[in-house]
């Protein structure tokens, strides 16, 4: 039996195109708005983690990432400009939940303990993994949509999010996890 041709182009394509479906463009813009809210939320939330952390290496890592996060906000604003869109944030329920969980860890652990620092690292890595997944997906989508300038900007941030995650793992593995294991 011979396969019949439908005469229509496939609805999904892996080739970059600036004439992609409006729905795909809308999904992409929605993802940028979601990250814009998330990054702005982190700018407000990270100082709480800094003040709750004890280990100097952890405090330094979070302070450094706070400064990077401010740059991430600026980059997203640049992307909105490139897209010809107004910089509008869409509430990111996932980031709100992850940061609330982090605040809960701080409330449930003793101040000044390595255990609290371990909890802060765990919560921070959940944030990083969400951002890595989001930025990674949007890099691919930007490429599919033919938005090479936007993809390049997103790739810079993705690399910084991966680096922050690696730094947090190193801090935990080299020092804090062992100190927490020795606490009574």
Image (cartoon, helix red, strand yellow):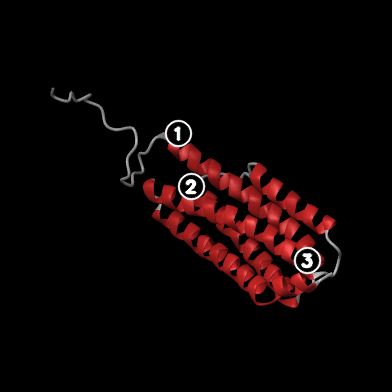
**How many residues crowd mark 1 within 10 Å: few (<14), some (14–19), many (20+)?**
few
Q: Are marks 3 and 1 in contact (CB under 8 Å)?
A: no
Q: Residue at x 55, y 41 (%)?
A: 30
Q: In the rendered image, which residue does mark 1 sit on?
A: 23
> Disc 2 to disc 3, how far (Cα)?
44 Å
Q: Nearer the viewer, mark 2 or mark 3?
A: 3
Q: Quadrant of the N terminus?
A: top left
Instruction: Point out residue 20 in the picture as x, y percentages from the top left corner.
Output: 37, 38
- Residue 131, located in which quarter of the rendered image? bottom right
Q: Nearer the viewer, residue 152 or 121?
A: 121
Left or right position of 125 against 113: left
Q: Is residue 167 above or below residue 13?
A: below
Query: For numbered disc 2, what is the local secondary structure?
Result: helix
Mark 3 vs mark 1: which is more N-terminal? 1
Q: Residue at x 82, y 69 (%)?
A: 113
Residue 115, label in figure: 3
Q: Are marks 1 and 2 in contact (CB under 8 Å)?
A: no
**How many residues crowd mark 2 within 10 Å: few (<14), some (14–19), many (20+)?**
some
Q: In the rendered image, which residue does mark 2 sit on?
A: 83
Q: Is residue 92 something that shows in the picture? A: no
> Disc 1 to disc 2, how far (Cα)?
15 Å
Instruction: Point out residue 168 in the picture as x, y percentages from the top left corner.
Output: 64, 68
Q: Nearer the viewer, mark 1 or mark 2?
A: 1
Q: Nearer the viewer, residue 137 or 182?
A: 182
Q: Quadrant of the C terminus?
A: bottom right
């Amino acid at each position: 039996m011979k396969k019949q041709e439908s005469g229509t182009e496939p609805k999904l394509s892996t080739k970059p195109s600036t004439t992609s479906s409006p729905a795909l463009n809308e999904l992409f813009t929605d993802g940028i708005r979601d990250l814009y809210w998330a990054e702005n939320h982190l700018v407000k939330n990270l100082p709480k983690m800094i003040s709750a952390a004890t280990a100097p290496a952890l405090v330094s890592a979070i302070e450094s990432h706070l400064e990077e996060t401010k740059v991430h906000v600026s980059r997203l604003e640049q992307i909105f400009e490139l897209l010809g869109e107004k910089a509008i944030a869409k509430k990111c329920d996932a980031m709100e939940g992850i940061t609330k969980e982090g605040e809960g860890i701080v409330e449930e652990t003793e101040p000044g303990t390595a255990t609290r620092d371990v909890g802060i690292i765990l919560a921070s890595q959940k944030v990083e993994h969400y951002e890595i997944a989001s930025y990674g997906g949007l890099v691919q989508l930007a490429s599919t949509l033919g938005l090479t300038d936007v993809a390049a900007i997103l790739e810079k941030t993705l690399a910084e999010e991966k680096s922050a995650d690696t730094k947090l793992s190193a801090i935990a593995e080299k020092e804090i996890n062992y100190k927490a294991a020795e606490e009574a």
